[in-house]
Image (cartoon, rainbow, N blue to C red):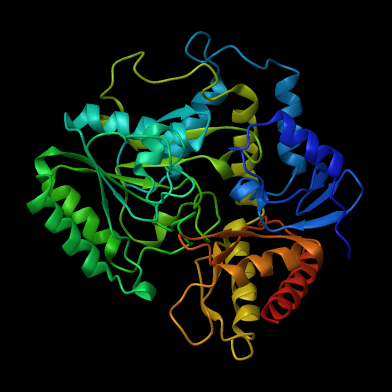
Amino acid sequence: MTVQTSPDLSARRAAAIAKGVGVTTQIYAERAENAEIWDKNGTRYIDFAAGIAVVNTGHRHPRVIEAVKAQLDAFTHTCHQVVPYENYVILAERLNAAVPGDFAKKTIFATTGAEAVENAIKIARHYTGRAGIVAFAGGFHGRTFMGMTLTGKVQPYKAGFGPMMNDVWHLPFPCPLHGVTGEDAVAALERLFKADIEPARVAAIIVEPVQGEGGFYPVPEGFMRKLREIADKNGIVLIADEVQTGFARTGKLFAMEHHGVAADITTMAKGLGGGFPISAVTGRADIMDSPNPGGLGGTYAGAPIAVAAAHAVLDVIEDEQLCARAERLGARLKQRLAALQDSVPEIIDIRGPGFMNAVEFNVAGSDTPNPEMTNRVREEALKRGLILLTCGVYGNVIRFLAPLTIQDAVFDEALDILEASILAAKG
């Protein structure tokens, strides 16, 4: 298959759009359906990116589109803070019931994942009267100033943007593959409390149950329970950033369900809207109620069209049993990758719960990350019509984020392309 790019559009894009807005491909989408995208030349691609875990229910799921069309015929915007609407209230009720935690909850809506994180930090600081925030190396929490301060990856997110926000501290993320155990990370937190900031000044600890941009590393067994104990002991708010892990991607509606403990605050976005921009913060009612009226909100926060889409997404996840499907798809993908390990020694790890999976490459027989081969795999797959994303601090991880609704035949085709691409990239 020969990939057809759009040189004229690429040149126009470069002339019109700031170079800081990077792109992974030169595919210019014309239409999309479920797990497939067609560009302006009519070339078809299988989408293993899903808009970075946004269309978990597939591009243009009929029920999502139907819900959006119905809302378009009613009204498109009032600003909930001015003229509220029932669907916003019902969606908050649904999330309050669905987010892990056996306690009373309340919810606010925003537009992006970064906004959700910003609001979670605001709420935690207001509730505790403290300023300190603990985050993790390799984590990603957005591109706003607080978001990139929390993010534990310099390139490309922090470089050149000047001083970060105050009172944010980073710990090593527990990743046994790279020599950091859960015990090591806990010990680092205890050293932080002794050397840099006393726990009485810490408002919140924020953590991704599975790191996204950082490399798709899941929190190891028992670590989240330990964080919960430390947070409870010291009056610290525990925030789970579920922006990328949420909405059936890991085989559960929320990844925290794998850990047997609940966060005080959960941030979410991406998969909630099925392609329409919406984010949410759900947490303990007493914490969420701390800020005064007017302290939270936004002009487009919980926009009616996105709220309608979110209701349809939740219905689809339940009715089509997408949590169970994520487990099946992920198992098939990991089995196919594992079958390559004998012939491709560059593969050092295959991981991830549900269908939030990744494969990591090193130089064969060494501990040296191999971003060159990783990128060759991505490029080879693109030539064959499969869109892949890389991630990781060293750029040596390919992450798999296909829609959970991908048809079996299309999924099998994608696995064949992936295998051929890895073998071709190996040389």
Rendered image quadrant of residue 179: bottom left
Compared with 10, 109 (above or below) is above
Q: In the rendered view, does 196 fall on the left or right side of 165?
A: left
Look at 43% across and 39% down and name the residue there: 160
In the rendering, at what x and y percent does residue 165 appear?
Answer: 30, 34
Q: Nearer the viewer, residue 90 or 109?
A: 109
In the rendering, at what x and y percent does residue 166 appear?
Answer: 24, 34
Look at 67% across and 68% down and name the residue there: 376
Q: In the rendered view, does 69 fall on the left or right side of 312?
A: right
Compared with 392, 84 (above or below) is above
Q: For the N terminus, which image quadrant? A: bottom right
Q: For the C terminus, which image quadrant? A: bottom right
In the rendering, at what x and y percent does residue 50 appear?
Answer: 67, 51
In the rendering, at what x and y percent does residue 215 appear?
Answer: 48, 61
Look at 33% across and 69% down and name the residue there: 221
Rendered image quadrant of residue 60: top right
Compared with 331, 65 (above or below) is above
Residue 62 shows in the view: yes
Rendered image quadrant of residue 150: top left
Q: Nearer the viewer, residue 272 or 394?
A: 394
